[in-house]
Image (cartoon, grey):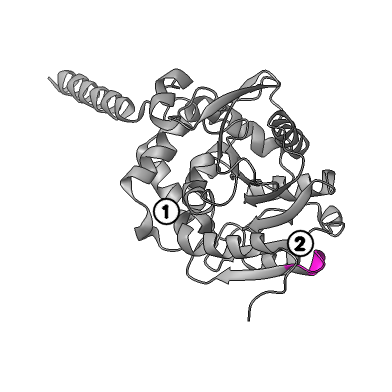
């Protein structure tokens, strides 16, 4: 009788574990299963380096200096929806999904270095016939943006750094999804399960006011993370990142620069804004005290207005 009870208890436990696993089991999805929702017009795909790069190119084609928007780690071009809506009536706005993220998916050669991201940004702009441009980037995208400015100074008219990476980081708050991707031994599990709660927690952790995080926003991050190959790419991206930064290159920048930062950024602390300002001659800072690591997404109206004013006259002194 006792053995029977043990067997029954074991069976119940096994069933509960299987049910729990089924509730978080999340296999990769092909891009064809996601593009209907996340790549409607004006989205298109451009063949580059063995990838189909997801991009949006909006606004007047007679704009001689388009603005290029580069997203951060585990984000997508959709993070700039608010800025694009605000800027495209008068500016040509180009944004795309970096390799390893969004609908672009993984790099065929697994190269997620800053050099690779810089090259593909310039190649994409060459393919679009864009010779001169302004560029804005958030977090990893900010690091890509200033690398582009350093690599092609004759092509970059203005630079906007939004909570950008570039110096050694001592984060106060790291999204749980990032911590999982950086943990050795979890690669197999990380690429096969994805509790929606992990995604929600990760997004909420980078907002200054987590109440701004909507269910539809979590759905977007969750579904695009499931794009085939993205989860396998993330640990590789972290392995190839240089947390020591490259401040020597930053000091060589001679482009008009606006540094925007969320005062509640726990991932890249606000004091990094001052470091950029000290190292980039003539740059200016705009701090948004109540916003977090993604101020362009958290409050697109206010941050886009600041960006527009700067882009209209990058070399003008800031308004008093």
SS of the residue under disc 2: loop
Q: Is residue 30 visible?
A: no
Q: Residue at x 72, y 38 (%)?
A: 130
Residue 227: percent from left, percent from top: 48, 26
Q: Residue furthest front?
A: 62
Q: Counting residues from the N terminus, which is met first, the one under dot 2 or under dot 1? A: 1
* Near-viewer residue (60 or 149): 60
Residue positioned 35% across, 30% down in the render: 24
Q: Position of residue 176 (x, y in %)?
A: 48, 46
Name the disc covering residue 256, or none: 2
Q: Is residue 184 magenta?
A: no
Quarter that holds the C terminus:
bottom right
Q: Position of residue 260 (x, y in %)?
A: 62, 63
Judged from the image, the secondary structure of the residue bearing numbered disc 1 is: helix
The range drawn in magenta is: 278-283
How many numbered marks have been drawn onto this rendered protein structure? 2
Residue found at the very far bottom of the displayed protein:
320
- Quadrant location of the N terminus in the rendered image: top left
Vertical order, 55 against 84 (above or below): above
Tell us which disc is closer to us: 2 or 1: 2
In the picture of the structure, the residue carrying the numbered disc 1 is 204
Asked if the residues shown at circle 2 and circle 1 are in contact, with their CB atoms under 8 angstroms apart, the answer is no
What number is the disc on residue 268? none
Instruction: Pinpoint residue 319: horizontal percent, then vertical percent.
Output: 64, 77
Residue at (71% x, 21% y) in the render? 49
Q: Main secondary structure of the magenta part?
A: loop
Of 138 and 271, nearer the camera is: 138
């Amino acid at each position: 009788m006792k053995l029977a009870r043990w067997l029954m208890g074991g069976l119940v436990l096994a069933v509960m574990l299987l049910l729990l696993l089924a509730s978080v089991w999340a296999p990769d999805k092909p891009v064809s299963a996601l593009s209907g929702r996340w790549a409607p017009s004006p989205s298109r795909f451009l063949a580059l380096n063995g990838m189909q790069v997801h991009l949006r190119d909006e606004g007047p084609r007679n704009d001689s200096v388009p603005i290029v928007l580069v997203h951060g780690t585990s984000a997508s071009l959709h993070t700039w929806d608010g800025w694009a809506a605000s800027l495209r009536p008068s500016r040509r706005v180009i944004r795309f999904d970096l390799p390893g993220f969004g609908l672009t998916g993984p790099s065929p050669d697994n190269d997620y270095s800053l050099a690779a991201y810089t090259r593909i940004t310039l190649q994409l702009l060459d393919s679009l016939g864009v010779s001169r441009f302004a560029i804005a980037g958030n977090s990893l995208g900010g690091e890509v943006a200033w690398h582009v400015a350093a690599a092609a100074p004759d092509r970059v008219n203005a630079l906007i750094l939004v909570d950008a990476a570039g110096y050694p980081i001592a984060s106060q708050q790291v999204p749980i999804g990032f911590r999982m991707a950086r943990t050795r031994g979890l690669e197999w599990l990380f690429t096969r399960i994805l509790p929606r709660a992990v995604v929600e927690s990760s997004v909420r952790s980078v907002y200054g006011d987590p109440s701004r995080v909507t269910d539809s926003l979590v759905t977007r991050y969750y579904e695009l993370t499931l794009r085939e190959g993205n989860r396998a790419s993330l640990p590789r991206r972290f392995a190839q990142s240089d947390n020591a930064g490259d401040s020597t290159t930053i000091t060589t920048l001679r482009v008009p620069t606006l540094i925007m930062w969320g005062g509640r950024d726990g991932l890249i602390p606000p004091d990094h804004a001052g470091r950029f300002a000290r190292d980039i001659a003539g740059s200016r800072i705009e701090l948004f005290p109540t916003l977090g690591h993604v101020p362009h997404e958290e409050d697109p109206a206010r941050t886009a207005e600041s960006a527009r004013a700067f882009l209209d006259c990058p070399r003008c002194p800031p308004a008093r």
